[in-house]
Image (tube, grey):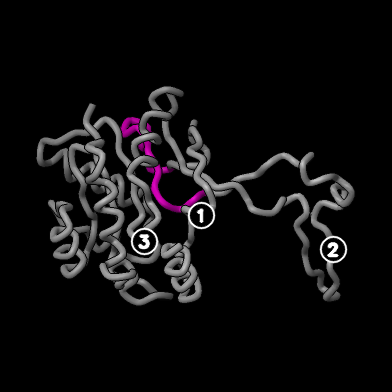
Amino acid sequence: MKNLALITARGGSKRIPRKNIRDFLGKPIIAYSIEAALKRGVFNEVMVSTDDDEIAEIAKKYGAVVPFKRSAETSNDTATTTDVIIEVFNEYKKRGFNFDYACCIYPTAPFIKPENLKSGFEIMLKDNTDAAIPVVKYSYPIQRALEIGADNRLAMVWPEHSRTRSQDLVPRYHDAGQFYWFKVSAVKPDMELLKMKASPIVIPETQVQDIDTEEDWAIAEIKYRL
C-alpha cells in the first residue's frame, strides 16, 4: 500500500494574513503538520500543495516535498479541497506515481499527534471504510442548545430535553479540523466527506482547537503551553 500525506496550504488568507506560515510558538504553524506526518513512517510521501513560493520553501525546510505548484484554478476562494485533491492526484499520475490511500492534513493544526495519524489509518483498514475522520465530543450537550429569537428572547432549540438529565443525553461530536484519511479510489468530483462511509477517530478536547480568528490563535497558544 502506498500512502500520501497531502497538506493543503495556499497563500491567500483573509482573516489571518499569511496564516499557514505565521509563527506559532517558535516556528511556522505548518511545520507542526509536516513534522507529525513524518514521524511515524506511515507515509511514502509528505507533500504540500501550494501556490506560494514562500510557503513552498518553508515546507521543504521542514522535510516536505513540493513536486509541483498549485494551479490558479485551485488557489482561488471558490475552489474546494476536493478540487485540490483531484488536481494533486492527476499531477502525480502524469509523473507515473499512484497512491492507494491519502491523508489530507490541515496546515494550521499544531495539536496533530503522530499517533492519531497512525491510528486513523489503522481504524480505516480495520473497519474497511472509505475514510477516517477525527472527531471531538461537544463539551456541553447540544440537545440543551439555546437560540435567540427575533424578539430577543431565549428559547431552547429542543425544548423536549428541558428536563432530560445530562447523563441520559446521547453524546454528539464534531469534526476536529485536523486531518482525514480516505481511499484514493473513493475520490470523486462531487465527494462529500461526511457523506462517505467513514470511521471516527475520537480525540480529546485538550488536543483540538479551530484557528480561524486572532482570538482562536491566542487560545491555541495558551492551550498548547498547558
Q: Which mark is residue 206?
A: 1
Q: Which residues are magenta?
A: 175-190
Give the amino acid type for the residue marked by disc 1 in the picture: Thr
Residue at (33, 70) in percent of width and height: 25
Outermost residue on the left side: it is 95
Please say whether residue 12 is visible from this viewpoint.
Answer: no
The residue at which mark 3 appears reads as: 108
Q: Which mark is residue 155?
A: 2
| Left or right: residue 58 compared with residue 9 | left
Above or below 30: residue 183: above
- Residue 120 falls in image quadrant: top left
Measure the alpha-carbon separation of dots 3 and 1: 16 Å
Q: Earlier in the sequence, mark 3 or mark 1?
A: 3
- Residue 109 falls in image quadrant: bottom left
Image position, residue 137 (x, y; %): 60, 47
Residue at (52, 49) in percent of width and height: 175
Q: Is residue 187 magenta?
A: yes
Give the amino acid type for the residue marked by disc 3 in the picture: Thr
Measure the alpha-carbon separation of dots 2 and 3: 35 Å
Above or below 12: residue 102: above
